[in-house]
Image (cartoon, rainbow, N blue to C red):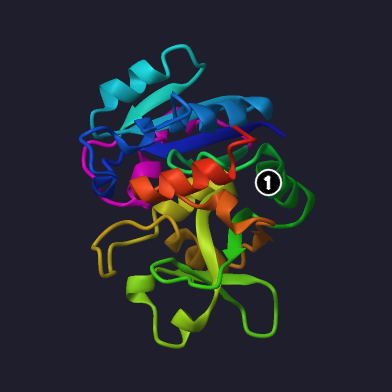
Amino acid sequence: MKKAAVILAAGKGTRMKSDLPKVLHEIKGKPMIQYVVETLQKLHFDKIIVVIGFKGEMVEQSLASYPVEFVWQHEQNGTGHAVMMAKDALADFDGNTLIALGDVPFLSSGTIQRLIDVLEQTDAKASCLSAIIEEPKGYGRIIRETGTSNLQEIVEAKDATEEQLKVTEINTGTFCFENSVLFESLTKIGTDNSQGEYYLTDCVKVMYDNDMPVSIVVADDPDEGEGINSVEQLAYLSEKFKDRM
């Protein structure tokens, strides 16, 4: 089965206390997005598309020697909108599409492969990487169908009920979809949420409502799927995963 990857890398990252695109902050002298691309290269993706926005020319320059394509997200309208920017580049692609985040540099090739395998080896139309954490404040919650292990929806923290906020299984933002199902689902999401944005996670509810199962892969190490949102977080995770780097 062919596979493509879309890396979301358009954000500024205001909490990084820098005017540099978030994905260009360095780990051991190398921009974090280069680690993401190199991990995907180990898995021999047929296409790697990088969605750029804030100071995107700098990201293009950073990845000039890598076999990737670029698409622009000129307005920041959410993760779903960012993925929509890759629609034309994947219009004729027949295979599975991984959605990865450019600020999650410690995700291993083994974990990504598990996500792909679950999609290819089951009747699922998508797979989602989740993590169990003790303090899930601020994270989107994994809501499973009552009495089953099926993923019913992902609710962002700002839109969650008090009961949903008690859930400790969170969305890491990493998914794998059947390509045609991904872009069909994106046409059915809206902006009726606290942010007024197109959430990629809303595709899960669209798929559930249309009897298209989404499988869940729980990360063995929750920190592996964590995004870099501050200089302190960058320092902590860089130290934890220093041997892998």
Residue found at the very far right of the displayed protein: 121
Q: Position of residue 110 (x, y in %)?
A: 71, 41
Q: Nearer the viewer, residue 174 or 146?
A: 174
In which quadrant is the C terminus drawn?
A: top right
Q: Nearer the viewer, residue 184 or 103?
A: 103
Q: Which of the image's four quarters has the N terminus?
A: top right
Q: Which residue is mark 1?
A: 111
**Image spot of residue 132 (x, y percent):** 60, 68
- The quadrant where residue 147 appears: bottom right
Front residue (pair 231, 14): 231
Residue found 37% across the figure and 58% down from its top: 199
Q: Based on the displayed image, in which of its 4 quarters is residue 50 positioned?
A: top left
* Residue 170 on the magenta segment: no
How far across and how far down the image is residue 156, in percent?
A: 39, 68
**Left or right for 128, reference 186:** right
What residue sits 79% from the left and 50% below the top? 121
- Measured as percent of width and height from the top left, residue 125 is found at 64, 54
What is the magenta range?
73-95
42 lies above or below 8:
above
Q: Residue at x 22, y 36 (%)?
A: 74
Instruction: Give the amino acid at mark 1.
Output: Thr
Specify whether 45 is left or right of 233. Answer: right
Relative to 176, is 1 above or below?
Answer: above
Does residue 79 belong to the magenta stretch?
Answer: yes
